Image (cartoon, rainbow, N blue to C red):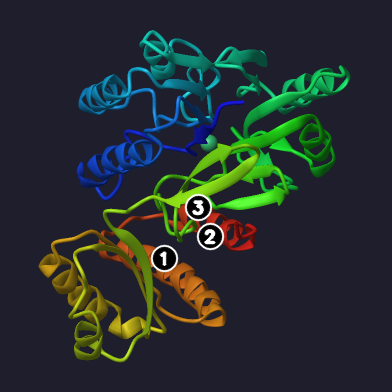
Amino acid sequence: MIPYGVIGDGHLGFKAYDTDRRTEETSATFAKAVELLSDLKVLFFPGDLFDDTTCPNWVKKKLLALKERHRDQVWVILGGNHDSTKTYSSVSVLDAFAEVHNVVTVNSFVPQQLDVEGISVLAIPHTRSQQAFLDAIDLLLATDKKWDVCMLHCMVNSRLDLSPNDLNVDMHRLESLADRCGHVWIGHQHGVERPFDNVYIPGGIMEFNFGELGPKYVYEVEDGCVARHQIPQPRTLEQVDLKWAGPIDMMDKLRNLSEDTIYKIGVNDIPAEEYSSAKSAMDVVVGQFKGDVIYNLNKTGHVEVQVTEINASFDLISEFEEFAAANGIPDATEMHELLEDAVSELLTEEED
Ligand SMILES: [Mn+2]
């Protein structure tokens, strides 16, 4: 069997921090990932090549130019939750890309068995429901077929941690599938994992958010051996947590932010009465920084947050009373009762 490469979730068109900068970086990083595997005849993409079906035209043009530079390379692309027909119920951007020379997409709700340059491939695309997904896998497991490569786009053993558009494969089915396949490649989760010896979650091509920090890789398979190559990153993400000790201290600690880093800054234990001072100081920091930064100003600890909520409800009612008195509203009793009911209902609502 000829060697092949694998690239995980590309999310082309990814948008963040209200600028095009991260979108451009996504396209550039994806191009670097492809360059790392440019000697290979076949590349597999286990889903979410695109972040969104409305991805900008310039992103599509860059992708077409990149594919043209690798026109002899065959790209086999699975539909993911971000770019499949399932998500958009009409034509997805992936369907349009399927018309390009040497591009094969699997985006049809039905598993496809393909022969790609002598590699036998089982591609299980995003289906309409979890049940349809499991039924499709069970149907394949009921045969005695074997495949060199299997691609899925789903969570692995997520238990109850599922979003509405997630699919999930359990460890039992995954193990059975792994027994039948040379290698299994699973897109969707952006962290790098290897649930079984021959089962790989390649991860995203970039740190798309602060829950998925760490090096990113492309994969190369030759004679059954898997090698991975780290994808160079334009910027890395870094989380910074500070304990509030006044505006001067905070500005001092955030003086040397690097423009090659995207920051998530958490400032903790801010007394309520110093919050506006913290906010002003943070506005100065953010205003002077030319890179991208998001931040949280956290007032107090958990117990004190409860106290703040009760204070807020008390303020609301007393403010209403003052308003009614100041504006000479004659009979505010009924409105007062309604407000009290609404506030107590809010307070008894469970947190989520
Ligand atoms: Mn996904």
Residue 109 appears in view = no
Residue contact between numbered discs 3 and 1, judged by CB atoms under 8 Å: no
Three-letter amino acid code at disc 3? Glu
Residue at figure coordinates x 52%, y 79% from the top left: 307
Mark 3 to mark 1: distance in Å? 16 Å
Q: Circles 2 and 1: CB distance less than 8 Å?
A: yes
Q: Quadrant of the C terminus?
A: bottom right
Which is nearer the eye, 314 or 79?
A: 79
SS assignment at label 2: helix
Residue drawn 51% across and 43% down? Answer: 219
Quadrant for the N terminus, please: top right
Relative placement, left or right, of 335 versus 319 is right
- Judging by the rendered image, the residue that carries numbered circle 3 is 334
Secondary structure of the residue carrying numbered label 1: helix
Please give the label number shown on residue 343: 2
**Circle on res. 316:** 1
Q: Amino acid at mark 1?
A: Leu
Residue 51, horizontal then vertical, whole percent:
40, 33
Q: Which mark is residue 25?
A: none
* Mark earlier in primary sequence (2, 3): 3
Mark positioned earlier in the residue sequence (2 or 1): 1
Task: Please state which of residues 279 and 42 is positioned toward the viewer in this rendering.
Answer: 42
Q: Secondary structure at mark 3?
A: helix
